[in-house]
Image (cartoon, rainbow, N blue to C red):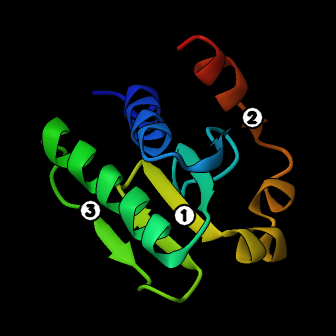
């Protein structure tokens, strides 16, 4: 599975768990860190955990091999590193504070067209 298909599948998992403001940033050509960032936020620690679990379940279904989860409940930011896709699940306050969408402002935002086509 290519990285675009993977990030779309993970975005769907976030949407299924009612994640807020799911954004996909296309980083190809901008960095070697990853091809895509998936950014969203939850309304509580429990919600953030549920979104993270949804992402992990999707990765298991995809048989995507190893991934790492950084962060724990109550920290306000959980990162799921899948190699070519990195998912960032924030609390609303931490998402506003870290502002990854502004930090990576040169990246194309592709989630609008992906989610609209669902």
Q: Which residue is mark 1?
A: 89
Mark 1 or 2, closer to the camera = 1
The answer to whether 44 is drawn above or below residue 118 in the figure is: below
| Quadrant hosting residue 75 | bottom right
| Residue farthest along the top direction in this orientation | 117
Q: Nearer the viewer, residue 13 or 66?
A: 13
Asked if residue 110 can be seen in this view, the reply is no
Could you say whether the residue bearing mark 2 is in a helix, strand or loop? strand
Query: What mark, if any, has residue 109 been given in the picture?
Result: 2
Could you say whether the residue bearing mark 3 is in a helix, strand or loop? loop
Q: CA distance from mark 1 to mark 2?
A: 17 Å
| Pointer 1 with pointer 2, Cβ within 8 A | no
- Name the image quarter holding the N terminus: top left
Mark 1 or 3, closer to the camera = 1
Residue depicted at x 46% and y 30%: 8
Report x, y in % for residue 78: 49, 73
Residue depicted at x 44% and y 33%: 12
Q: CA distance from mark 3 to mark 2?
A: 24 Å
Query: What mark, if any, has residue 68 been given in the picture?
Result: none
Q: Which residue is mark 3?
A: 67
Residue depicted at x 35% and y 28%: 2
Q: Nearer the viewer, residue 86 or 10?
A: 10
The answer to whether 19 is drawn above or below residue 114 in the figure is: below
Neighbour tally class for label 1: few under 14, some 14-19, many 20 plus, Cα within 10 Å: many
Q: Is residue 71 left or right of residue 20?
A: left
Report x, y in % for residue 21: 69, 46
């Amino acid at each position: 599975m290519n990285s675009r298909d993977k990030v779309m599948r993970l975005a769907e998992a976030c949407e299924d768990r009612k994640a807020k403001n799911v954004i996909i940033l296309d980083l190809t050509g901008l960095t070697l860190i990853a091809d895509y960032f998936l950014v969203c936020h939850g309304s509580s620690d429990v919600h953030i955990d549920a979104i993270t679990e949804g992402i992990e379940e999707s990765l298991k279904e995809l048989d995507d091999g190893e991934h790492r989860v950084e962060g724990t409940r109550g920290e306000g930011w959980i990162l799921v590193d899948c190699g070519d896709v990195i998912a960032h699940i924030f609390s609303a306050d931490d998402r506003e504070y870290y502002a990854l969408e502004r930090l990576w402002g040169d990246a194309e935002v592709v989630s609008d067209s992906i989610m609209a086509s669902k």
